[in-house]
Image (spheres, rainbow, N blue to C red):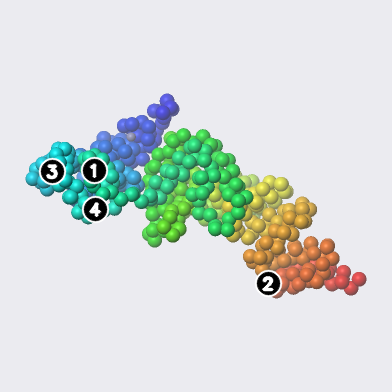
């Protein structure tokens, strides 16, 4: 903990380390979820607080928690308390005392083996706490919060390759894209200097196919990971340096930039791009718009780099591929441009700009038949496409010679 944090406004007023993410009605101060759990387990919190612990029964808590890990932590505290108090269930005996005798231990083991628990209860914790050697405990299933923590721990020890393996990657993904993704992770100072993370909250979408996990990194930065359920696994699909709700405003942010660029208001577009780009670090759209911005400002080299980033972030992003190929074409790197144009046509066979550009390369190479075929296809897809019309006229003249 640095000195700075002690005075920092958003720290928990009890531990002064974690984020004070909720206002405690009991002490009238911002506190962290861990200190909230430590306090509320005694069930003496004011009724009005959402986080007040109301017991449904011994093993089901009625209260608000912001993450599964928080809920589990609270359950453990509740179970610990339960184990050290007389229980009617066992004729007023204290489970922790019972567990010390052979007979009592057996009784508790039977009780917990037969009990229908909700899946959240960490039986392994009970087993250890009460020394119930014969209690059968199944392995805990890793949820998205555990995986999110695993991901951040890999980043702390700079295992970039293993971290990227936790992404959702297309099955036919090539190695160069994986290397790009690894390099991209390392690009961010927050990741390179990551020392600690605190889980703040998590949420799942209604269809239970996506989940967001919100952290504070290095005791200051907001960071949210988005997961998607793929078969029975959770895979990382995106990350932002922001609170979870910012995932919802990503489209709007993209549109704002697009509008400014279309109006040629480049300075403003650039300012917004810089702002959003530090937040939406996995967005192919912002990389693409950065590319457009640099094309409009005639910085071809930078434009090319950003189009390439967009293309690698989202392999399905045809416009980014096209623009990358076109930049290479304009720079005179014909061989690579040509290869990329063909690759695009493999995916979208009637992309008019690609058909036209490829045709123009083929005209220069005097491959007139193929060029004509491509131009016809281009005009079929977009009859009023002036460049393709002009190229076709040029071609017809050349063929007459
Ligand atoms: Zn605290």
The span from disc 1 to disc 3 (Cα, nearest Å) is 13 Å
Is 123 on the left-hand or right-hand side of 5?
Answer: left
Comparing labels 3 and 4, the label whose residue is closer to the camera: 3
Callout 4 secondary element: loop
Residue drawn 72% across and 53% down? 327
User: Would residue 24 be seen by someone viewing this image from the given angle?
Assistant: no
Q: Nearer the viewer, residue 59 or 225?
A: 59
- Nearer to us of marks 3 and 2 is 3
Mark closest to the chain's N terminus, 1 or 3: 3
N-terminal-most mark, 3 or 4: 3
Disc number for residue 117: 4
Mark sitting earlier along the chain (1/2): 1
Q: Specify the farthest residue to the top.
A: 3
Give me the C-alpha separation between circle 3 and circle 2. 82 Å
Task: Specify the quadrant that holds the C terminus.
Answer: bottom right
Q: Nearer the viewer, mark 4 or mark 1?
A: 1
Residue at horizontal 22 percent and vertical 40 percent from the top: 131
Report the residue marked by disc 2.
Answer: 381
Observer-nearest residue: 295 or 231? 231
| Residue contact between numbered discs 1 and 2, judged by CB atoms under 8 Å | no
Comparing labels 4 and 2, the label whose residue is closer to the camera: 4
The answer to whether residue 50 is left or right of residue 295 is: left
Task: Write down the quadrant of residue 262 in the picture.
Answer: bottom right
The residue indicated by pointer 3 is: 103
**Earlier along the polypeptide chain: callout 3 or callout 2?**
3
The residue under label 1 is 133
Q: Secondary structure at mark 1?
A: loop
Q: Residue at x 64, y 46 (%)?
A: 267
First in sequence: mark 4 vs mark 2:
4
Give coordinates of residue 104: x percent, y percent. Answer: 14, 43
SS state under label 2: helix
Tell me what residue is drawn at x 16 percent, y 46 percent: 106
């Amino acid at each position: 903990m640095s000195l700075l944090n002690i005075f920092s406004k958003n720290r928990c007023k009890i531990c002064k380390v974690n984020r004070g993410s909720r206002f405690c009605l009991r002490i009238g101060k911002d506190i962290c979820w861990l200190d909230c759990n430590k306090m509320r387990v005694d069930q003496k919190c004011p009724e009005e607080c959402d986080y007040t612990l109301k017991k449904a029964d011994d093993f089901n808590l009625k209260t608000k928690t912001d993450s599964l890990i928080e809920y589990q932590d609270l359950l453990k505290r509740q179970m610990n308390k339960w184990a050290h108090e007389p229980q009617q269930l066992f004729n007023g005996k204290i489970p922790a005392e019972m567990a010390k005798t052979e007979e009592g231990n057996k009784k508790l083991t039977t009780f917990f083996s037969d009990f229908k628990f909700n899946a959240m209860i960490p039986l392994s914790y009970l087993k250890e706490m009460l020394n119930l050697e014969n209690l059968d405990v199944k392995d805990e299933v890793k949820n998205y919060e555990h995986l999110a923590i695993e991901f951040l721990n890999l980043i702390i020890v700079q295992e970039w390759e293993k971290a990227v393996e936790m992404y959702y990657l297309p099955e036919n993904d090539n190695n160069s894209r994986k290397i790009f993704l690894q390099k991209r992770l390392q690009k961010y100072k927050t990741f390179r200097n990551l020392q600690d993370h605190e889980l703040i909250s998590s949420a799942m979408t209604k269809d239970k196919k996506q989940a967001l996990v919100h952290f504070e990194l290095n005791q200051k930065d907001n960071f949210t990971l988005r997961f998607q359920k793929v078969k029975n696994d959770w895979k990382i699909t995106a990350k932002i340096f922001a609170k979870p709700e910012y995932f919802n405003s990503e489209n709007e942010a993209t549109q704002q930039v697009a509008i400014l660029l279309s109006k040629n208001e480049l300075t403003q577009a650039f300012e917004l791009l810089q702002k959003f780009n530090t937040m939406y670090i996995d967005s192919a759209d912002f990389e693409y718009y950065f590319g457009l911005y640099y094309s409009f400002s005639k910085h071809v080299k930078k434009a090319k780099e950003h189009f390439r980033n967009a293309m690698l972030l989202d392999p399905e992003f045809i416009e980014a591929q096209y623009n990358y190929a076109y930049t290479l074409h304009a720079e005179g790197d014909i061989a690579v441009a040509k290869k990329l144009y063909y690759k695009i046509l493999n995916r979208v066979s009637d992309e008019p700009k690609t058909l036209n550009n490829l045709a123009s390369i083929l005209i220069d190479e005097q491959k007139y038949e193929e060029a004509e075929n491509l131009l016809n296809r281009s005009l079929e897809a977009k009859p009023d496409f002036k460049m393709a019309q002009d190229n076709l006229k040029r071609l017809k003249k050349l063929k007459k010679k």
